[in-house]
Image: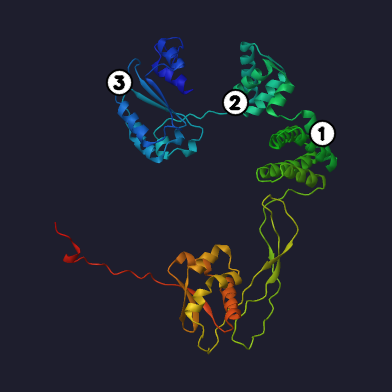
Amino acid sequence: MARIFAKGLTCENLNDGNPCGQCDMCIDIAEGNLVDVIEIDAASNRGIDEIRDLREKILFAPNRAKRKVYIIDEVHMLTKEAFNALLKTLEEPPEHAYFLLATTEMHKLPETIISRCQTFIFNRFGLDQLVERLELISKSEKFSVEEEAFQLIARKAEGGLRDAISLLEQISAETESNITTDAVRDSLGISATETLEQFWSAIEEKDAEAGLEILKGISSAGKDFRTFGHDFLGFLRDKLHQNLTDGEYITKLLPAINQIESALAQLKTSPIVELPLEIAVVNLCQGIAAAKPIEKKVVTAPPVSTPVAPAPVAKVAEPVVTKEVEKKSDGFLFEELPKVEHKPEKIEEPVAREPIKISVDTILSKMSEIADQAKIPAFAKMSFLNTKPAMKNGKVVFETTSSFHREKLDSEVIRNSVQNTMIEMFGESLLIDFSITDVVEEKETVATADDFLTF
């Protein structure tokens, strides 16, 4: 379309605003030989240097045509700096220069660029329009094509004319221009209508075994499950449109559409390709609704009062068993499973404590052993080993100059684990803590005359 527009801007024999397509300018543009129509692929020429080069050359007058036309394809790929460099030229272009910016993702263009352009939105082609165009091409190229084959190719193209023509060319090369419905199905991996009907019948009759057998046959034939899922969704959509007034039939279709859509979303991440569709079949045959994201609900056991121990040693509370509804990453809901959730008790400092007998050097030499026995998580173990122990206010304080390490260790569970481990290891009642200390700045060294050599 940009090239046709460029012909309109340079054509010597316009017919009511339309290019004639026969003058030298139109022919050269069609063949890509007119130097005054410059096509730029922004996907590979997206930097500021390319736009600067364009700004310098645009000032020169056109060589042959009366206008110079720049066609920038995939313009949304330009960098932010390139857009800023192009902005001034778009705002005040030379009188002879025109820009045609082509993109499939206009939402990625800066608003400052869009506001300086006239915008034309092209819609996708309808199914009948695609079929009509494919028939015209096949007739001119003398292809032998079955009527249903046109429909299959047009559906696969999903409104894209270029995609439809590419598929037609591909299949004609494979079949030596004798394009049958079966050849199109085999080439594009499209499921046969009979297979889709059998699959739907198995679901309607709640025959899970028959449905799974069909999926097994698709797997054995090496066909793509995503393609089959898309084909089946299209099949259900057609059924939906045909039975809009039949409320009872609609109530059968909607759960099937939801289940298949959910299964297709999980195909990419499923370790077993067939599994999401198999589960969808079982759910539909057993009348189970499609799994939906839900909020986690935690049912916690009632709090139990803990008697105060006479010894001034704080121990970690026993884990409390809770039940939590788990939602797997594949989107299916499973039964409630017991889950252990640690509920650490608050460490209360005793009123009076005996002086700590162990030395800092002893603790420092046992850091790795403490970390291992306390079972410090891997993400926090290195942070613990980067601390230095010190004695402050009757506590063993592990100090660090890094807020990153401090945040990793700032946990009641880790603090309790380390404290209990040290109590068992050294046989002494003590409390521990983690803190961050200021970095000690080195004094600036002032050079004296003796520090220099004279030549």
Given contact means CB atoms under 8 Å apart, are the residues at marks 1 and 3 in contact? no
Residue 163 is labelled as: 2
Which residue is rendered at x = 48% and y = 31% of the image? 103
Which residue is rendered at x = 63% and y = 29% of the image? 158
Which residue is rendered at x = 47% and y = 31% of the image? 74
Residue 73, image x, y percentages: 46, 29
Dot 1 alpha-carbon crowd within 10 angstroms: few under 14, some 14 to 19, many 20 or more: some
Dot 2 alpha-carbon crowd within 10 angstroms: few under 14, some 14 to 19, many 20 or more: some
Residue 455 is labelled as: none
Choose top left, top right, bottom left or bottom right for residue 187: top right
Tell me the SS state at disc 3: loop
The residue under label 1 is which amino acid type? Answer: Gln
Counting residues from the start of the chain, the first of labels 1 and 2 encountered is: 2
The residue under label 2 is which amino acid type? Answer: Asp
Tell me the SS state at disc 2: helix
Residue 237, image x, y percentages: 72, 35
Counting residues from the start of the chain, the first of labels 2 and 3 encountered is: 3
Residue 217, image x, y percentages: 79, 35
Q: Is residue 322 above or below residue 422?
A: above
* Residue 243 in view, yes or no: no
Residue 61 is labelled as: 3
Considering depth in this image, is 88 or 162 the residue closer to the camera? Answer: 162
Residue 249 falls left or right of residue 414: right
Choose top left, top right, bottom left or bottom right for residue 180: top right
Residue 34, image x, y percentages: 39, 16
Q: Is residue 61 above or below residue 231?
A: above
Residue ID for mark 1: 198
